[in-house]
Amino acid sequence: MGGVGMLVLGINHILKWCQIVSGGRRYTCPTKVINGELFFHFKKEWHRVLDFATKHTHEFK
């Protein structure tokens, strides 16, 4: 986790995905709740959304 240079741009709670930027490219990743926290799947790993979200991250509920 961390150190990969990722940023969560948006979270879509209804469709269960989030959009991230990593290495200058944009990706849409599936999300799921693990132990009450939201995670996204990227490069064969689950990453905690809060670790890569900012105050500019958009959320769609």
Image: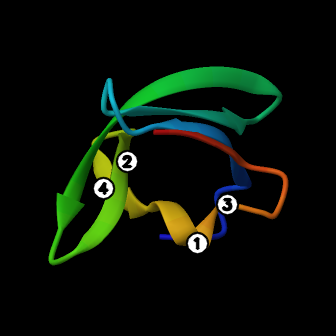
- Closer to the chain start, of discs 1 and 2, is 2
- Closer to the chain start, of discs 2 and 4, is 2
Marking on residue 53: 3
Asked whether the residues under the numbered discs 3 and 1 touch, taking CB atoms below 8 Å apart as contact, a structural biologist would say: yes
Q: Is residue 14 above or below residue 33?
A: above
Disc 2 residue type (three-letter): Phe
Mark closer to the observer (2, 4): 2
- Closer to the chain start, of discs 4 and 1, is 4
Secondary element at tag 3 = loop
Q: Which residue is mark 1?
A: 51
Secondary element at tag 4 = strand
Q: Is residue 55 above or below residue 35?
A: above
Marking on residue 40: 2
Rendered image coloring scheme: rainbow
**58 sits left or right of 50 in the view:** right
Q: Which residue is mark 4?
A: 46
